[in-house]
Amino acid sequence: MKPSLKFIALSGTTDVTENLYVYEYGNDMVILDCGVGFPDLEMPGVELVLPDFSYIIKNKHKLKGVVVSQGHDDHVGALPFLLREVNVPIWCPPIVTEFLKVKFKDYQVVNYKLNTFNPDRDTFEVGAFKFSPFRVAHSVPDTVGYAIDSPAGRTFHVAEHKMDQNSTDGMNFDTEKCKRLAAEKPVLCLMSDCLGSNDPGMAPSGVEIEENMFNIAKSAPQTLYMTAISSSIGRFQQMMNVAQRLNRKVVLVGRSVQSKIEIAYNLKYIKYLPNQVIDLRESKKYNPSKLMYIIAGCYGQPGSSVYRLALGEHERVQINPNDTFIFSADPGPAYSKESIDFIVDKLTDIGVDVHYYDLHEGLHVSGHGTQGDIVELFKIVNPKYFVPTGGTIRYMKAYEKLAVKFGAKAENVLRLKPGESVIFDGEEAKRSETIPVKEVFVHGLGIGDIGKVVLEDRTLLGDEGIVVVALKINKNSKTLIEKPELTSRGFVFQQKFGGILDGGEQELFNFLQKKNLKDIPTMKNFSIQVLEKYFFDKTRRHPMILPVVVEV
């Protein structure tokens, strides 16, 4: 029998990050994108969230390669971790190749193969699949969509896009090529971005941002600071243009900004005068009114250059009253607004003139298409089936409504949760197996060693604190020798509220004496039960109770 085409959304369909999709035909498997997620407020200590590679590792004998659509970390950031598990070639456009070289060096990945293609003219084959890329407009250069051919037919995968024909990085949506690829043969299915499906109209290009930044910057009396997402090369070009118009030298602060602008400059994706960018050490020679700093950390991430600058902790840059700071970014990732609000307040308190998202000064546009862009893609591709990606449940539902209004049958819009799959058999699609998946957390050198229980414990410790119970036990008789000793951290201030702990010691001692227990595990369990009830009655709080047994 002729094999079927199988599409698996391993992750990236109920969130805007962790994009990882699998295409299978017979014994050939290809991954499209491999991105990381970012921790939310319920993940204390977690640095990154990875997709679950278990299915890929189990079927690595079928894996022919990874194909990448763009250079944002939510599409490529998990590749260093995947390459620890499988040795597989990667296909990507030029700027993504250079981004990945830096990333692999940072993660000490040495055994890799990058195949760079030109989105304007190249096609390539990976196993049973033929990929025909075409440019799409997004917030990072060299973002592409794909027409993907297999013996089962042609599908389109457009991970993120807007129909912009005046993109700030000069890389517009290649409408003509997309139309030609769609017209060559019937399109079985379109997998595409749904994040803007609740917003009406067409997404703006962002050309006006430069003039808006200039109007603020021209009256800045002292040092000028600007920040944006580190891969927003078009936005950095606009910042360079503003600096040149104001005769200000540019200083790059933060490794991510420095490396990505250098890569873009070498590829001729960004242009500036040879002496326009100066080293941070040289900046001390210039009057502050002649400097613009482009600084990393637009989301206010703890430890970033922006964060350290605002807290006065940056080792080489100091911000002062009457300086001007422009955020050319909106709080996109989950829970980032709290971090940026904190930074904005800190800078404002110092006396800095801060221009940010809430002021609505036209300093940022999204790289994601809105309803008009999404429907325009529908019109060009005209697929039989639709799979929304890169958004949450509500965005997928809004995408479905757009597709139905466009003329699709509701049952032909396949909203897939992580691990769910669909099989295309001939011209028909049907839901298939659900692959068990979980989120994998990265903390320091540990990958996957933190789970739900650990995070719950961390949250409890952060919210309620801990009480350590020292139980001194006779080694031979296994009986309690003296009254338990309680020590708290993050629960109550011991010097002021020590009476609560003293009462807890007596309460537990009386209980254990009455029970006359000689079994250590049972003694620990009763200690937790008794003290949990006692502290809740006294404080209406639930500290973590940690019994520690000392045998003497």
Image: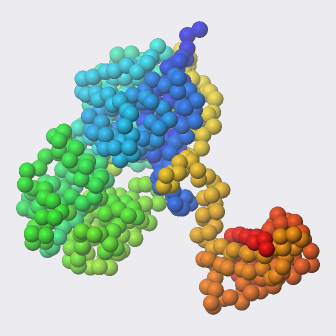
Task: State whether residue 65 appears in this view.
Answer: yes
Q: Residue drawn 48% across and 55% down? A: 444
Q: Is residue 513 left or right of residue 363?
A: right
Question: Furthest-top residue in view?
Answer: 1
- Residue 495: percent from left, percent from top: 62, 90
Quarter of the C terminus within the rendering: bottom right
Query: Would you place residue 136 above or below residue 177 in this image?
Result: below
Q: Residue drawn 49% across and 16% down? A: 152
Based on the displayed image, in which of its 4 quarters is residue 138 positioned? top left
Q: Is residue 365 left or right of residue 302?
A: left
Q: Is residue 429 left or right of residue 352?
A: right
Query: Would you place residue 271 above or below residue 320 in this image?
Result: above
Task: State whether residue 413 appears in this view.
Answer: no
Quarter of the N terminus within the rendering: top right
- Residue 279: percent from left, percent from top: 15, 59
**Foreground: 500 or 404?**
500
The chosen color scheme is: rainbow
- Residue 2: percent from left, percent from top: 55, 10
Q: Residue drawn 60% across and 24% down? A: 430
Query: Would you place residue 234 above or below residue 325 in this image?
Result: above
**Foreground: 263 or 132?**
263
Query: Would you place residue 538 above or below residue 426 in this image?
Result: below
**Foreground: 129 or 102?**
102
Based on the displayed image, in which of its 4 quarters is residue 454 positioned? bottom right
